[in-house]
Image (tube, helix red, strand yellow):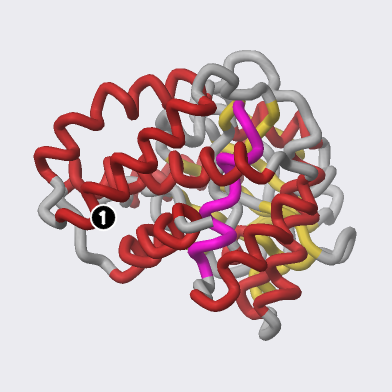
């Protein structure tokens, strides 16, 4: 998953105030219990013409700044539709999906991974619109931060893995790609819908190579025995070159570890899973 800074409790009243403003501004009626995420507040609502929708208010940051542009580009193809948005605040009015039926609840993890592969193939088929963050810039930033990370990393085996991840990144960094990436498509960010069996939500848009999309699908609902099969199924679904996808996935492992070291948040189980995925792909 993408690492995000949680919204402090003191900021929640500001989001609630903004939500109340847009309930009036867009003539919406609350239609269920609000859902509070890591950095956003989502309210089930009904529009003036009776259409079920979801009002999303959030604090603008680099990760969510391009969300409206991405949703407009996809236009409902594999993702929730955008019904209205307010660019200055990043407030979105979205097609309402079934929050009680996430893909994470599907018992068969292989079937769930196949669903993710199909959605990623549809989403990354679209070229990125102008103005999004670019994977090439992120890759250069990772290379600049690597020396400090290697000095900070306490585990020798992980330092070796990070060096291998950086070497893999150098192999592909000169061709960072131009597809529209969701960047955080894990099983909790896919919901059932009346319009389509499954649709993606909550993108953190990025312009780049689709190989950079795979780590959340590999690490979420992690199964060590299924890592290689899942990786092959995802690369097949997206029509990716296997070695380039492997390199970009190792780069994503590096990115997550850089975040953890810089925030002083190492040792969490989900972090260990991402490192385990990196070790498994390094051995391919």
Q: Residue furthest front?
A: 283
Image x and y of residue 280, in percent = 46, 62
Where residue 36 sits, quadrant-wise, is: bottom left
Q: In this view, does 48 lie to the left or right of 213?
A: right
Q: What's the residue at 83%, 54% (across, down)?
A: 51
Which residue is at the front of the view, 73 or 268? 268
Image x and y of residue 144, in percent = 27, 22
Q: What's the residue at 51%, 43% (across, down)?
A: 57
Image height of 104 relative to 43, above or below = below
Which residue is at the front of the view, 109 or 245? 245
Residue picked out by circle 1: 9
Residue 203 seen:
no
Q: Does the magenta stretch include residue 217?
A: yes
Residue stretch rendered in magenta on the structure: 208-220
Q: What's the residue at 68%, 31% (across, down)?
A: 180
Q: Quadrant of the C terminus?
A: bottom right
Where residue 108 sits, quadrant-wise, is: bottom right
Which residue is at the front of the view, 231 or 157? 157
Image height of 65 relative to 258, above or below = above
Q: Is residue 134 magenta?
A: no
Image x and y of residue 160, in percent = 25, 48
Which residue is at the front of the view, 95 or 30? 95
Residue at disc 1, secondary structure: helix
What's the magenta bit mostly, secondary-structure-wise? Answer: helix
């Amino acid at each position: 998953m993408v690492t995000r800074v949680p919204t402090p409790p003191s900021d929640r009243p500001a989001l609630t105030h903004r939500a109340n403003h847009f309930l009036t501004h867009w003539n919406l009626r609350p239609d269920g219990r609000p859902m509070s995420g890591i950095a956003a507040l989502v309210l089930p609502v009904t529009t003036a013409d009776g259409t079920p929708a979801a009002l999303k208010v959030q604090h603008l940051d680099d990760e969510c700044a391009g969300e409206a542009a991405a949703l407009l580009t996809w236009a409902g193809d594999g993702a929730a539709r955008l019904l209205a948005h307010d660019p200055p605040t990043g407030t979105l009015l979205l097609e309402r999906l079934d929050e009680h039926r996430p893909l994470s609840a599907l018992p068969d993890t292989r079937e769930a991974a196949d669903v993710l592969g199909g959605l990623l193939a549809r989403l990354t088929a679209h070229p990125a619109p102008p103005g999004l963050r670019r994977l090439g810039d992120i890759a250069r930033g990772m290379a600049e931060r690597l020396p400090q990370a290697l000095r900070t990393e306490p585990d020798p085996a992980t330092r070796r893995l990070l060096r291998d991840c950086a070497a893999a990144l150098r192999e592909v960094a000169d061709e960072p790609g131009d597809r529209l990436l969701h960047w955080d498509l894990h099983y909790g960010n896919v919901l059932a819908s009346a319009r389509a069996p499954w649709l993606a939500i909550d993108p953190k848009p990025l312009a780049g190579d689709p190989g950079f999309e795979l780590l959340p699908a590999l690490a979420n609902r992690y199964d060590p025995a299924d890592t290689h099969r899942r990786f092959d199924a995802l690369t097949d679904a997206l029509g990716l070159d296997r070695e380039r996808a492997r390199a970009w996935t190792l780069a994503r492992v590096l990115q997550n570890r850089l975040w953890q070291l810089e925030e002083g948040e190492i040792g969490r189980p989900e972090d260990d899973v991402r490192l385990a995925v990196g070790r498994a792909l390094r051995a391919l």
